Image (cartoon, helix red, strand yellow):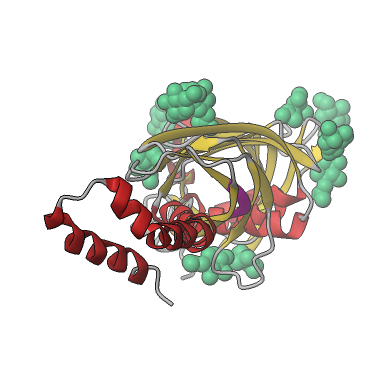
Amino acid sequence: MSIEDKPAVLQAENVKEKPRRRGCAGHCLKFWWVYLIALLVIIVIVVPIILLVAVPKLAQSKLDEAELTVDSIVMTNSQSNNFTMAINSTIRSDGKVHAKIEPFTGKMYIEDIPSHHPFAFINFPETTSDAFQVVNVSQFTPIDDREAFTTFNTWLLQNDTFDVTIEGDTFVRVKGIARRYPVTFKKTVTLPGLRNFEGTTVFDTSISLETNRTKVPNNFLGKTRIPNRSIVTFEIGNTTFYNYLLGQDIGEVFIDNLILKPGNDNVFDMRATIEQGPIVTALGKKPYCDETKGVLPVQLRGKNVTNNGQYLSYFADALASANQTIELDVGGTLKKSLNITIPCSKDQ
Ligand SMILES: *[C@@H]1O[C@H](CO)[C@@H](O)[C@H](O)[C@H]1NC(C)=O
Ligand SMILES: *[C@@H]1O[C@H](CO)[C@@H](O)[C@H](O)[C@H]1NC(C)=O
Ligand SMILES: *[C@@H]1O[C@H](CO)[C@@H](O)[C@H](O)[C@H]1NC(C)=O
Ligand SMILES: *[C@@H]1O[C@H](CO)[C@@H](O)[C@H](O)[C@H]1NC(C)=O
Ligand SMILES: *[C@@H]1O[C@H](CO)[C@@H](O)[C@H](O)[C@H]1NC(C)=O
Ligand SMILES: *[C@@H]1O[C@H](CO)[C@@H](O)[C@H](O)[C@H]1NC(C)=O
Ligand SMILES: *[C@@H]1O[C@H](CO)[C@@H](O)[C@H](O)[C@H]1NC(C)=O
Ligand SMILES: *[C@@H]1O[C@H](CO)[C@@H](O)[C@H](O)[C@H]1NC(C)=O
Ligand SMILES: *[C@@H]1O[C@H](CO)[C@@H](O)[C@H](O)[C@H]1NC(C)=O
Ligand SMILES: CC(=O)N[C@H]1CO[C@H](CO)[C@@H](O)[C@@H]1O
């Protein structure tokens, strides 16, 4: 049976009775059974349907319509097994329903990896259904699934953008109703990735020809600017990179106390220990000896990350997942530091 039928009957009786302008006394007495049926219908059918079906459906659909935006993520105090995660976000909705969403623990996973293994859990505080809601969370975060967390860091490092889903079961309380309704909070946000630090530059360089590593441990010094296109701040720590030139491993690059913030102001001191032989050979080759004027394409790939003495495999493995090519003005540095210019070698 349909809920609409009964009130319609009730209305029909009303219309019929109205012209006689009888008082309720007689009317109500005569048609008491109509009112009783209507009341029973409301109590037995309509109220439960509204409370058990309509309200929860509405609560879930309003929650589904709400939009989550992640404004910033900050990862600090990075340790081998845990870190501190802060997320500032906003939830926007039409604000028409007055409700409270109870605190809950949401799992975070990469949407495009079908297994949906969570890489972290976030403790959402109580929120309301206000049209504009700021949700700032800062929490200690254990790394329960290192593989999933490493994958998250790898995607964040490599991709242009990628989708992360936050999902958790919670309850909604609608104003004026004592009942709490189970709902699922599930939002997918698109995060910008770091594009493997594309656009990293090295400048203010100097070079030394000293080969005694006790005297001069690092024969190449400079500053590097690492762009961060993402909204994530990372405390990475002391970082070591493999250094390749034309496919050959020529040494190591070190950046200490690496903390990457969103934007272009990430400038760090860098130092490197590189073999002279392959560098000199490359500088004498075309196009490096003429066209590029001594600018060499070197490649960097993550080797080791330690923060306050702790090895951070989830950053080290992510940084090791790909090479990043950097244009390094070795010729210009040699000229500036030592007044040496390497001419094109004759045998090529
Ligand atoms: C966080 O992890 C480190 C090891 O990486 C451990 O020493 C420390 O006890 C952990 N902190 C907590 C609160 O579990
Ligand atoms: C969130 O906002 C607060 C207040 O403006 C700020 O102190 C905090 O650093 C922000 N956290 C993140 C993760 O951006
Ligand atoms: C939350 O973070 C935003 C953005 O960082 C900030 O503007 C706002 O003041 C913060 N609110 C609270 C309550 O911390
Ligand atoms: C993101 O990067 C990972 C690792 O490089 C790659 O496997 C994946 O296909 C990329 N996903 C998207 C959506 O670009
Ligand atoms: C390297 O330098 C150290 C310190 O100046 C010196 O003691 C050592 O003998 C040198 N080693 C070589 C092989 O010249
Ligand atoms: C990085 O480049 C080196 C040298 O060209 C190569 O041997 C290595 O396989 C590359 N690694 C990745 C992950 O692309
Ligand atoms: C990383 O560097 C630390 C400190 O230099 C060292 O103890 C550790 O063995 C290195 N780990 C790897 C995997 O290279
Ligand atoms: C990085 O290494 C230097 C020199 O070994 C050390 O003094 C510093 O504490 C390290 N920094 C971090 C964040 O681990
Ligand atoms: C650099 O070397 C060239 C040729 O070897 C010499 O003529 C010139 O004076 C040198 N310049 C400086 C600043 O030492
Ligand atoms: C080079 C580059 O992509 N820089 C971006 C770094 O991040 C800030 C803020 O996220 C962007 O505005 C820059 O364009």
- Highlighted magenta segment, given as a residue range: 167-171
Task: Say which of 165 and 319 sits in front.
Answer: 165
* Residue 86, placed above or below residue 96: above
Task: Give the side of residue 32 with respect to residue 303, left or right.
Answer: left
The overriding secondary structure of the stretch rendered in magenta is strand
Residue drawn at x 46%, y 65% as measured from the top left: 346
Task: Say which of 250 and 262 sits in front.
Answer: 262
Residue drawn at x 49%, y 49% as measured from the top left: 197
Q: Position of residue 241 (x, y in %)?
A: 66, 48
Task: Give the side of residue 263 with respect to residue 310, left or right.
Answer: left
Q: Position of residue 109 (x, y in %)?
A: 61, 58
Q: Position of residue 309 (x, y in %)?
A: 82, 33
Task: Say which of 256 and 102 sits in front.
Answer: 102
Query: Which quadrant, please, contains the N terminus?
Result: bottom left
* Residue 263, placed above or below residue 109: above
- Asked whether residue 95 is in view, the answer is yes
The answer to if 341 sits in the magenta stretch is no
Residue drawn at x 41%, y 60% as measured from the top left: 38
Q: Toward which corner of the image does residue 178 lie, by quadrant?
A: top right
Task: Give the side of residue 195 with respect to residue 273, left or right.
Answer: left
* Residue 145, placed above or below residue 216: below
- Asked whether residue 274 is in view, the answer is no
